[in-house]
Amino acid sequence: MLMYLWIALSVAGSLLLVAGLLHALPKFGFKGVTEWLSRAPGLDVFIFYFTVLPLFVGPWMAVRSTLDAGFWVGLGGLVAAVAGQVLTVCVWTVLHEMAHREAVRGPRIVKQINRSVGPLRNHAAVWWTAWAVPLFAMIRIAQYLVYPPLTWLVRLPKYKHEEWVSVSRHKFEGLVGHDMVWCLYCDWMTGVWSLGSEMLRNVESFWCPIRFMPDKKCENCKTDFPDIDGGWAAFNSGMEQVEKTHAEHYPGPDGVNAWFGHPVRLTVKGKKK
């Protein structure tokens, strides 16, 4: 038990130390570093240090300390690491709010939502969303490893990740403590999801430009996949129409095979010759 407590405290101490350094950087003239860390790829380093790395370090510390690579030892290390992450958020929140007392006394998101649904439900629900962090981390890894080869294999469009995956809400005046943590989480999460959706638009329209059979699914999906109403073949049209649709919408080996509404199609390079 003492070992797992040590792991949790070690994780929390390491994360809080780096968080403190990040707060200090602008004050010592290193504002450029914090700007780099606020957008990809620097933001990815920041996010993975705080969210993913502890999930591997915890089990490793447990196995190394006991010389036992058993499942339960590793699981205990993982739970201890997560506890350290939670402790980090709680301690940082208290310290940040103590440093911004005036903002704490003013209007806040957490106050409004507490009034709306109650403090217990609000905090339970917002912590419950933390389960999604590993999911978004895996999506981010796929954006680096899975999608890029498609840009030269079948000429899907390339993207500047920093234009999608970034955070800026830390600059919003009056956003402190609890509100700051979760707004930054949403800031990052939204960018990752939006970039992933953009990549999927290219993949789906390029390989399967066929409308879904249920009209309800087409209606629900067309917001994220506008090509459903922008040119996909009808589900009962036959493969000849599907082949014709693909030939009409894609420029071939000398163009960029983006989804139909992609901005690259407004350029000469994106047009079919």
Image: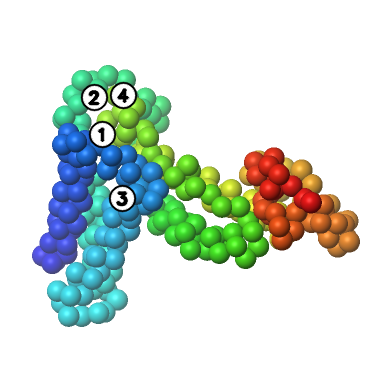
Q: Amino acid at mark 1?
A: Gly
Q: Residue at x 17, y 44 (%)?
A: 21
Helix or strand or loop: what does disc 2 sit on?
A: helix
Disc ID at residue 177: 1
Nearer to us in this view, 162 or 195: 162
CB atoms of marks 4 and 3 within 8 Å? no
Q: Which residue has dot 3 on it?
A: 46
Residue 240 appears in which quarter of the rendering? bottom right
Q: Earlier in the sequence, mark 4 or mark 2?
A: 2
Q: Residue at x 19, y 71 (%)?
A: 62
Q: Position of residue 221 (x, y in %)?
A: 67, 46
Q: Rounded to the nearest whole Å, what is the CA distance between mark 4 and mark 3?
A: 22 Å
Helix or strand or loop: what does disc 3 sit on?
A: helix
Q: Residue at x 15, y 58 (%)?
A: 10
Q: Rounded to the nearest whole Å, what is the CA distance between mark 4 and mark 2?
A: 12 Å
Q: Residue at x 25, y 69 (%)?
A: 59
Q: Which residue has dot 2 on it?
A: 104
How busy is the neighbourhood of tag 2: few (under 14 within 10 Å), some, or many (20 plus)? some
Q: Amino acid at mark 2?
A: Val
Q: Rounded to the nearest whole Å, what is the CA distance between mark 3 and mark 1?
A: 18 Å
How busy is the neighbourhood of tag 4: few (under 14 within 10 Å), some, or many (20 plus)? few
Q: Which residue has dot 4 on it?
A: 173
Q: Rounded to the nearest whole Å, what is the CA distance between mark 2 and mark 3?
A: 26 Å
